[in-house]
Image (spheres, rainbow, N blue to C red):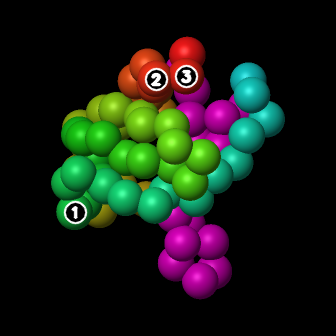
Amino acid sequence: MKVMIRKDSKGVLSAYVPKKDLEEPIVSMVNPDMWGGLVTLANGWQLDLPAMAADTPLPITVEARKLASAEE
């Protein structure tokens, strides 16, 4: 799924999913630089982000994979 990753003026990272019209803050990351690992959104979704350079400029739209959750 297409996901836009951005950082607001306070430095908070968030993910926007256009097909769902959903924007949620990123609350945890497996990798400190975020790319190439799992991130967890405030609503509980886990997204597997592609591997990219740590200094990738934001905002950026990437192809992420949503992991299935228990309630699905």
Q: Is any atom of residue 2 visible in this view? A: yes
Q: CA distance from mark 1 to mark 3?
A: 28 Å
Q: Are marks 1 and 3 in contact (CB under 8 Å)?
A: no
* Residue labelled with disc 1: 32
Q: Secondary structure at mark 1?
A: loop
Tell me if residue 18 comes above or below residue 29 in the rendering. above
Marker disc for residue 71:
3
Query: Which residue appears farthest toward the front when viewing the image?
Result: 71
Amino acid residing under circle 2: Ala
Q: CA distance from mark 2 to mark 3?
A: 4 Å
Left or right of 16? Residue 29 is left
Badge 2, how many Cα within 10 Å: few under 14, some, many 20+?
few
Q: Secondary structure at mark 2?
A: loop
Tell me if residue 17 comes above or below residue 12 in the rendering. above
* Residue labelled with disc 2: 70
Q: Would you say residue 6 sits in the magenta stretch?
A: yes
